[in-house]
Image (tube, rainbow, N blue to C red):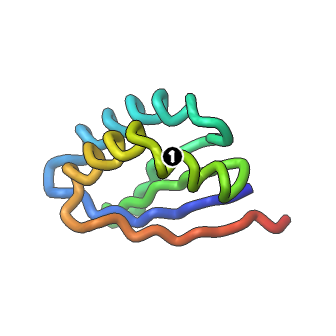
Amino acid sequence: MFVAVVEVQLKKGMEEEFKKWVNESNKELAKFDGFVNRRLLATRTGKHAMLVEFENQAKFEKMHQTQEHFRIQSKGHSYMETPPKPVFYEVVN
């Protein structure tokens, strides 16, 4: 499995709107081959990250090349103070 942990810094007052967008966009992302799951994480201090799971890196990258993903990503970025910071992992155990 291929996993991305994406640190996001939301604009002030945008958390509830961002949560709605996550739920709506997850329905669209679920249509992509290889999509497993995507969740919004929050620390007790108010920092956020997205946990994105795909069957493999190739299917993740293929999804990233589509117009649908570009549209979803652009909308998500509108809620963010700074660009997202992804770190990629392969599940090894």
Horizontal and vertical percent position of residue 3? 63, 59
**Quarter of the figure that contains the C terminus:** bottom right
Residue drawn where x is 46% and y is 30% of the image:
28
Tag 1: amino acid: Arg
Between 72 and 15, which is closer to the camera in this rendering? 72
* Displayed quadrant of residue 6: bottom left
From the viewer's perspective, tell me whether residue 35 is left or right of residue 70: right
Horizontal and vertical percent position of residue 44? 39, 62
- Label 1: which residue? 39
- Residue 91 to residue 34: above or below: below
From the viewer's perspective, tell me whether residue 21 is left or right of residue 66: left
Between 91 and 58, which is closer to the camera in this rendering? 58
Horizontal and vertical percent position of residue 32? 58, 35
Q: Please state the total of marks drawn on the protein image.
A: 1
Q: Secondary structure at mark 1?
A: strand
Direction left: furthest residue: 12
Between 77 and 11, which is closer to the camera in this rendering? 77
Residue drawn where x is 39% and y is 40% of the image:
67
Residue 77 showing in the rendered view? yes
